[in-house]
Amino acid sequence: MGKKIACVITDLFEDVEYTDPAKSFSEAGHEVVTIGLEKGQTVKGKQGQEQVSIDKGIDEVSPNEYDALFIPGGFSPDQLRGDERFVTFAKAFMDEKKPVFAICHGPQLLITAKTLEGRDVTGYKSIKVDLEYAGATYHDQEVFVCGEQLVTSRQPDDIPAFNRESLALLSK
């Protein structure tokens, strides 16, 4: 049975880091719900190729309504972590041991939520030090799965591995 995946996203997300995993999740029978600042808003990818319509505003949702969390990269996660509502939302998934999929700069939201201490992760090379300061062990590889819960990848080239491991976790 398909799972309901919350995707937190705002302007300047990395286009393919949203579109490619979202397509894979949908094709596998899962539902991806985009969550942003306000319902009906259109957010634009940083490559200028993609536009995404926001399904739900952050004030309309509760982590209990979703089975997993997906955080695409780009500048979107850095902007979202400046908003306590998104930080609290992400923290709930980590605390409740629900699957979390974060690619590229996606883990920045999890750093701000203070949920990476003792975790094994990867992410974009420019946030390696941030991840280490947050107490995580950084692995320079295309995908890393920590504790049957957290799937992280570094960059767009890693998307096939990211999708594969995220889907494997969703099927459990």
Image (cartoon, rainbow, N blue to C red):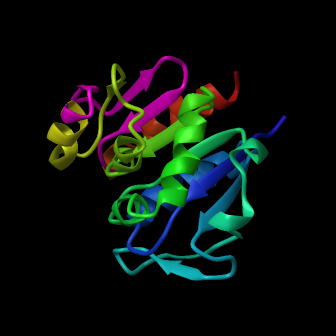
Q: Magenta includes 138?
A: yes
- In this rendered view, identify the residue nearer to me: 55 or 2: 55
Which of the image's four quarters has the C terminus?
top right
For residue 46, side relative to residue 130 (left or right): right
Image height of 146 relative to 162, above or below: above
> Which image quarter: residue 123?
top left
Q: Position of residue 87 (x, y in %)?
A: 48, 51
> Which image quarter: residue 141?
top left
Q: Magenta includes 92?
A: no
Q: Position of residue 106 (x, y in %)?
A: 39, 50
Q: Tell me, yes or no, if residue 5 can be seen here.
A: yes
Query: Which residue is drawn at the image coordinates 15% and 38% (left, top)?
Result: 129
Magenta segment:
133-155
Query: Which residue is drawn at the image coordinates 64% and 63% (left, top)?
Result: 34
Image height of 84 relative to 149, above or below: below
Q: Tell me, yes or no, if residue 163 can be seen here.
A: no
In the displayed image of the protein, which residue is found farthest to the right?
Answer: 1
